[in-house]
Every structure is written in C-alpha cells, then in structure tokens.
Image (cartoon, helix red, strand yellow):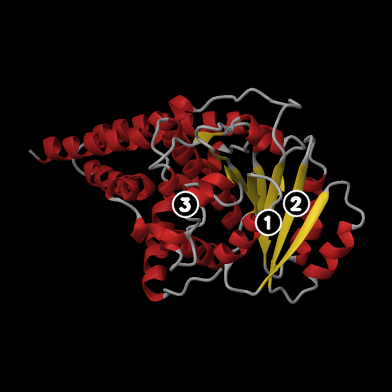
Amino acid sequence: MPLIILSFILLLLLLIQAVFYILPAVVVRKDEESHKDDVPPVSVIIACRNELQNLKSNLQYVISQKYPEFEIVIVDDNSTDGTCEYVSKLQNTSPCSIKLVKNDGKGKKNALSCGIRAATYGHLVFTDADCRPFSEFWLAGMMSRFDEVNPLVIGYGELSGRTFSARFSSYDAALIAMQYLGFASLGHAYMAVGRNIAYSRKLWDTLGGFGTHSDIASGDDDLFVKEAARHIRPTVCFSPEAKTISPAKGTFGELLRQKSRHVSTSTRYSLIDKFLSGGEIVSRSLFFAAAIAMLFISWQFAIAFMAVRLLFVLLSHAKFCNTTKTDFNLFMSLIFDIFAPFFYFTLLVYKIFNRKTEW
C-alpha cells in the first residue's frame, strides 16, 4: 500500500513539474532577426538612483543601437553620485538624443511615470542602468515583436556572473524566464522583468499608469503586465539579439534582498498566477521529499521517477538556453536543481523577518 500511495504522489508531482517545463519549452522558438527600417521611433526609458558607474559601463551599448530613430530618457531619481553631471556632459556628444529628467526621490514607479510623460515618442522600451543590450539590434528585435493591437512586448533579461551565487541566480533567472515567456506565448501572461519590456504610452494611459498598485514599491513590471493582460494579449521576444544582460548578485545576502523585493508583489497575484509563479519550486521540493521516502520502499521506482523528471527538466532548460544563447552547464544545472528548494526555503524565512521593501 505505501508503494502505491507514494507512486501516485510522485506521478502527480511529476505531471505538475511537466507543466512548468515541457509546456513552456514547446513554444520556445527562434525569432526571426529583424533589421527593418520601417519601424516606429522609440523612447528608451531608464530610471536610476545613484548608478553612475552602471551608466558609464552600459549606456554606450544603448546609444550604439542600430535603429532608425530613438531617444534615451534618463530619469535621475534624486541621485547624489554625479549622475546628473555625467548625463549632462553626455548629451553634448551622443549621436542620439538623450533627455535628462530629474525626479524627487519618490521611488521607481514615480520615476518611470515621469520618464513616460517626458518621452517624445509613443513607443516605449524600458531597461535598467545595470543592464546592457546583448547586441546592437536589441531595439530592432524588441520592436519586431511589437503589435499595435496588443502593444506590449515581454523580453528576456539574462543574469551573469562568476560566483556560485551569481551562477545560481543566472540559472534561476533562465528557468523563470522560460516559464513566464512560455506561458505568455500560450496566452497567459503573468509577469515580466523591468530590465527588458516594451509597451505603448497609449496602453499605459489606458490602464491609468501604475495607479492600481501605486501603494507598493514594486510591480512596475509584473503587476503592470497582469493588468494589461486583462485587455490585450502581450507578445513575447525570445531572440538573443533582443535580450539584455545584467550582473547577478555576487553574494547570497544580496540575492536574498533582491528576491525579497521581487516576491513582495505576490500578495496581489490571483490564485492561478501564484501557482504559475511559485508552483514549480513547491512541487519540486515535494517531489524530492517523496522520492527520498520512496528510496526506503523501492529504490528502483525512486530512481525511475527521478530519471524521468531529470530528463525533461534538463532538455527543457537546455533548449531555452540554446535558443536564447544563454550559458548552459550540465553539472551546475544538476547542482542547482537540488540546491534551489533550500534557497527558496531560506528566502521564505528571510521574507518573514524582513518586510521592508526598497527601490
């Protein structure tokens, strides 16, 4: 009897895991490269606070985009590190228009809102100061997926780094992206990342900006997408040319603080969105626990279940990484597959005792 019960539990958890890996991976595709000239002018919006070094490192990658007509809107949210002075000097030498908007330190959503209102063009692309486009066709790639009927494009923001924490963060970001991009392609968009997203100012105005969630610091990306998805069907960009790259947090302390900010919006998620955003790690943890229990009853069954899961997990992950030109390390993926439940349990404990959310 215990064998039958555990086998049923493992099979159920295996099916749930398949939903998060096989289903999204099926729709992962190689987008056609688009270097067309008949594209609308674009305003690139970057909100920042005390990120002078990041701007010095990454802004040139945005300036050098191969795109017919675009401007860059830098919103300085009350920086004290010389950001304004640096951008002001850059305005005189940049081949593209750079607009500097000063904000009064009321947070990222307020800063983004100021940037949107100051933008010259109606097509908006957003990224962060610590991000750089993967290629000079980032804007072209994102705008190639733009649909005037459904004017919101969800892109991929890759994380990179050399430390164990950074490598785990990169692995985790790729899996999360595979799932939210995959489910968005299937018709259910529930999140995005602010470091690579595009939409029209008309859509932003229609939704009342960030008004429905203005009372919390986070959510300019995921909650905005969820709100928009009630009215339109967002499009997805898998093209590696159109991804952004930013450095992952180098220590687990930094990663915990970052993740804590990211999950702070989960209280606004619907039940189905909570399942899609958190169901994978929960079902993975339960699967591992049940598989360990099965080892004491029938190690052959336990190994068989774990082998089946590992096969489709690694194949799905590898396919996404190959399509998006993200580094895939088989050995590290195996390590992180086991490590992730322990990290997220630590995050849960951390979130319980640290409720402060910063910009």
Image spot of residue 356 (x, y percent): 46, 75
Q: Sequence-wise, which precedes: disc 1 or disc 3?
A: 1
Q: Quadrant of residue 143?
A: top right
Could you say whether the residue bearing mark 3 is in a helix, strand or loop?
helix
Please name the residue that numbered disc 2 is placed on.
Answer: 72
Judge whether 8 appears above or below 289 on screen: above
Could you say whether the residue bearing mark 1 is in a helix, strand or loop?
strand
Judge whether 150 appears above or below 220 on screen: above
Of 25 and 193, nearer the camera is 193
Please name the residue that numbered disc 3 is placed on.
Answer: 224
Q: Sequence-wise, which precedes: disc 1 or disc 2?
A: 1
Left or right, residue 119 beside residue 202: right
What residue is rendered at 67% in x and 68% in y?
49
Q: Sequence-wise, which precedes: disc 3 or disc 2?
A: 2
Please name the residue that numbered disc 1 is placed on.
Answer: 46
What residue is rendered at 48% in x and 71% in y?
357
Of 52 and 46, nearer the camera is 46
What residue is rendered at 67% in x and 64% in y?
48
Left or right, residue 54 beside residue 199: right
Q: Amino acid at mark 1?
A: Ile
